[in-house]
Image (spheres, helix red, strand yellow):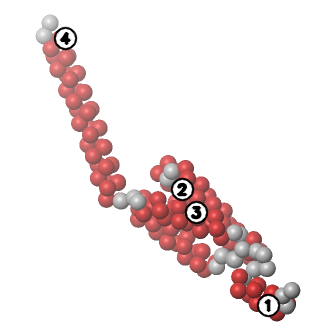
Amino acid sequence: MTSPWRRASARRETGTGENGPPMIDTKQFEGRITVLQAALRDRLRLRGATLERQVRRAGRLLPRRQRRAAQTLLGAQDWMGHPRLARLLDHRPVDAAFADMHRHLDRIDPRERRKTAVLRLVGGIVVNLMTFGALLYLLWRYVLSA
């Protein structure tokens, strides 16, 4: 049987009770949220004062899995605002959500996204001009020449 001193020592090391998961450090969590907000701003050009606003603006730019991870982080952010709930929060899903979001955002190249957007715009304009030219040719050939 362990002595009370050893149990108290174990509680101090983990930051919680004997069997609970270790607590998430509030300052470290807020720092990670700030880094994620900066990544969303740099990679996807999402403006917003809060992570919630950025996720809402992201919409379909984020795949379903990353939207779910963002919702996990938003829920954790709410819990971290309350000291008693922060102690109950399990760090594993939060860490997994951060890793998932960063893994997705690291694969995005902002320069490539801009180039793709410009090429799609130019391609759409070219297709519309070709269609308009074909209609003008058919109009001139069959309607006006008869």
Q: Name the mark on residue 140.
A: none
Label 3, on which residue?
97
Residue 111: x %, y % from top left: 31, 59
* Mark 1 → mark 3, Cα distance in angstroms: 34 Å
The CA distance from mark 4 to mark 3 is 63 Å
Viewport quadrant of the N terminus = bottom right
Tag in front: 4 or 3: 3
* Residue type, mark 3 in image: Ala
The answer to whether residue 45 is left or right of residue 1 is left
Label located before the other in sequence (1 or 4): 1
- Location of residue 140 with respect to 80 vertically, above or below: above
**75 lies above or below 16:** above
Amino acid at pointer 4: Val
What SS does tag 2 mark? helix
At a point 63% along the width and 60% down the height, the residue shown is: 72
- Residue receiving disc 4: 143
Is label 1 or label 4 in front? 1
Q: Residues within 10 Å of mark 3 (few under 14, many from 20)?
A: many
The residue identified by callout 1 is 6
Q: Which residue is mark 2?
A: 66
Residue 4, percent across and down? 85, 90
- Badge 2 or badge 1: first in the primary sequence: 1
Q: Give the quarter of the image for residue 131.
A: top left
> Which numbered disc, 2 or 4, marks the residue that appears first in the sequence?
2
Residue found at the very far top of the displayed protein:
146
Q: Residues under labels 2 and 1: Cα distance?
A: 42 Å
